[in-house]
């Protein structure tokens, strides 16, 4: 079990001042696993995945990626070599074209020749259906298109792990599906996916496992079937009754 | 009053000093250029420091900025003229005070003063870039410095060009306070000429010369402002017209 865990989280705690946001989180994530993180707003979901690639520094506890501990020293290399993240607000670089958004990291960080990086970027844009927008600037795309570009940008560096923090929450309803479609396609590959989302249909369709976070703790864990149809804790039941009406 | 203003003889007499004016103008431009370079170096350094986490460095930059923004530049010039040589004399136990050259006093006078303002321009420019930009860069594996260089500063530049140009304009005008302390700039020669002739025309000539360089700078501010506003406008238009966005 330990050997095929790509991410191992041990006794992870995070406080912001007096506020305990994560309280003794222990979690192993298998290579290629599709994990969905659910939970009410403020329960610590974002903080958990931000701790995984060290955008937040844990107060205590350890995180291992492929057996190597993430530290103050190596986290930049670890996130460069293993991880990519897709944000709720897309966070595309507005001063760069769509194509340049995709080629920047490969060219500057991974020393890929520009021509090669562009060819590879075009392939990824093709996959998210936006090859025709290569020369556009992000602000001239719709929200759904921007998020698909952000996913393509996350993929060009060939991460083993991709983190999503509510990728569809900032979108107009009619654009949610175009993004989810791309994510469903992606889930067929052996990349490890960790998604914070409220899209229950998506979770049911792609998740190998669902965890439910409440007040800084993991209170529920299991396959989507188990968790949705037969939640153990009252908090989870209450949450689903609200979301699934 | 109007008659004396239009009096051709007075204009002719005042224009006889024009070579002096030109020399002063040259000094004004040289002080502006060198002072601007100093102001930019200080401004960039302190502006970057102000956005970092280090509390001690931040405090130094806050104190510097507050001090130079909240004392008159004239007093600062006097400080360089009288105070600094006295301090140097004390420090090195010299028998005679070493006088800084007028040019050096001029460039440091305007440079240190406007450096404080430019630092604020740069700090607010950097802080205006949404935090998500830096996080996106870090999550891709860029270091803090790379994120600054590739992602944040390029976005900052467009926003800070208008206030930066305004500062350049203000710096140029403020070199005229040099006349009160050490002299040799355009305002100094204008003062000298008017003091000698008693004809107000001298000041008008100087004003026209200042205007000739300041007005284009003011126009440049307008151009940069329009340029900085252009992108959000596009965004607004796009929002109205955005449709399905199918694959
Ligand atoms: N940088 C921060 N400083 C202080 N408090 C924070 C910070 N980030 C998050 N929090 C707080 O931590 C709690 C959990 O936040 P978050 O992880 O964003 O929750 P979720 O993503 O589940 O909505 C919230 O109460 C939030 O206000
Ligand atoms: Mg969140």
Image (cartoon, coloured by chain):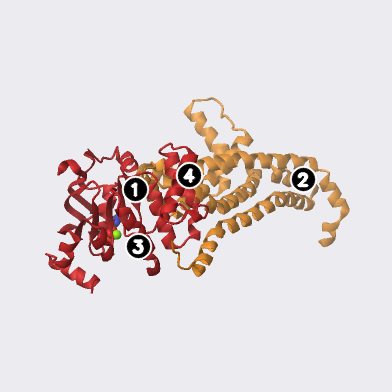
Chain colours: A red, B orange
Name which quarter of the figure residue A76 lies in.
Answer: top left
Question: Tags 3 and 1 in contact by the CB under 8 Å rule?
Answer: no
Q: Residue tagged by mark 1?
A: A84
Residue B149 visible, this angle: no
Q: Which of marks 4 and 3 is nearer the N terminus?
A: 4
A40 relative position to B37: left or right = left
- The chain under label 2 reads B
Q: Mark 4 lies on which chain?
A: A
Residue A45 seen in this snapshot:
yes
Of all chains, the one bearing label 3 is A
Quadrant of the rendered image holding ligand 1 = bottom left
Residue B236 % position (x, y): 51, 66
Q: How crowded is mark 2: few (under 14 residues within 10 Å), some or many (20 or more)?
A: many
Compare residues B233 and B166 and report the one nearer the observer.
Answer: B233
How many angstroms separate mark 3 from mark 1 (CA)?
A: 17 Å
Q: Identify the residue at horizontal 21%, vertical 39% (top origin).
A: A67
Does the Cβ of the disc 4 residue fall within 8 Å of ligand 2? no
Which is closer to the viewer, label 1 or label 4?
4
Q: Is residue A111 above or below residue B166?
A: above
B17 left or right of B222?
right
Q: How far apart are marks 2 and 4 (CA)?
A: 66 Å
Between disc 1 and disc 2, the foreground one is 1
Q: Residue at x 38, y 59 (%)?
A: A89
Q: Which secondary structure lies at badge 3?
A: loop
Residue under pointer 3:
A168
Say which of B27 and A156 sits in front: A156
Tag 2 secondary structure: helix
Identify the residue under disc 2: B193
- First reached walking from the N terminus: tag 3 or tag 1: 1
The verdict on label 1 being within 8 Å of ligand 2 is: no
Q: State the residue position of label 4.
A: A118
Using the numbered discs, state the Cα–Cα distance from disc 2 to disc 3 in whole angstroms. Answer: 72 Å
């Amino acid at each position: 079990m330990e050997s095929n865990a790509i991410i191992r989280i041990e006794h992870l705690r995070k406080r912001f001042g007096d506020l305990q946001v994560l309280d003794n989180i222990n979690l192993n994530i298998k290579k290629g696993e599709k994990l969905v993180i659910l939970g009410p707003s403020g329960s610590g979901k974002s903080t958990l995945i931000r701790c995984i690639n060290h955008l937040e520094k844990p107060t205590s506890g350890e995180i291992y990626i492929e057996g190597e501990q993430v530290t103050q020293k190596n986290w930049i290399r670890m996130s460069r070599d293993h991880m990519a993240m897709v944000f709720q607000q897309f966070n595309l670089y507005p001063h760069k074209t769509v194509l340049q958004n995709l080629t920047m990291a490969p060219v500057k960080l991974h020393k890929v020749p520009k021509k090669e990086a562009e060819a590879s970027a075009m392939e990824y844009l093709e996959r998210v259906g936006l090859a025709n927008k290569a020369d556009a600037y992000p602000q001239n795309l719709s929200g759904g298109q921007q998020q698909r570009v952000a996913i393509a940008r996350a993929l060009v560096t060939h991460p083993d792990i991709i983190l999503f923090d509510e990728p569809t929450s900032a979108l107009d309803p009619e654009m949610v599906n175009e993004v989810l479609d791309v994510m469903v396609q992606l889930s067929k590959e052996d990349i490890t996916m960790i998604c914070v989302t409220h899209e229950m249909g998506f979770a049911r369709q792609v998740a190998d496992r669902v965890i439910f976070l409440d007040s800084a703790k993991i209170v529920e864990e299991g396959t989507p079937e188990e968790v949705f149809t037969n939640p153990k804790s009252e908090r989870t039941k209450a949450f689903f009754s609200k979301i699934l009406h | 009053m109007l008659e004396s203003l239009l009096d051709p003889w007075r204009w002719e007499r005042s224009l006889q000093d024009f070579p002096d004016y030109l020399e002063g103008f040259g000094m004004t431009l040289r002080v502006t250029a060198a002072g601007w370079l100093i102001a930019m170096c200080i401004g960039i350094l302190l502006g970057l420091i102000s956005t970092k986490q280090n509390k001690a460095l931040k405090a130094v930059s806050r104190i510097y900025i507050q001090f130079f923004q909240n004392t008159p530049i004239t007093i600062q010039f006097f400080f360089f003229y009288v105070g600094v040589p006295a301090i140097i004399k004390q420090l090195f136990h010299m028998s005679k005070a070493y006088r800084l050259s007028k040019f050096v006093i001029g460039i440091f006078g305007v440079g240190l003063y406007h450096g404080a303002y430019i630092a604020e321009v740069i700090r607010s420019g950097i802080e205006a870039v949404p935090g998500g930009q830096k996080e996106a860069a870090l999550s891709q594996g860029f270091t803090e410095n790379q994120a600054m260089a590739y992602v944040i500063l390029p976005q900052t530049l467009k926003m800070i060009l208008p206030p930066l140009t305004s500062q350049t304009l203000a710096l140029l005008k403020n070199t005229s306070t040099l006349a009160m302390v050490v002299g040799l700039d355009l305002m100094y020669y204008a003062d000298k000429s008017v003091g000698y002739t008693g004809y107000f025309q001298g000041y008008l000539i100087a004003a026209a010369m200042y205007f000739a360089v300041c007005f284009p700078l003011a126009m440049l501010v307008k151009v940069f402002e329009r340029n900085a506003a252009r992108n959000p406008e596009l965004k607004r238009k796009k929002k109205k017209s955005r449709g399905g966005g199918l694959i």
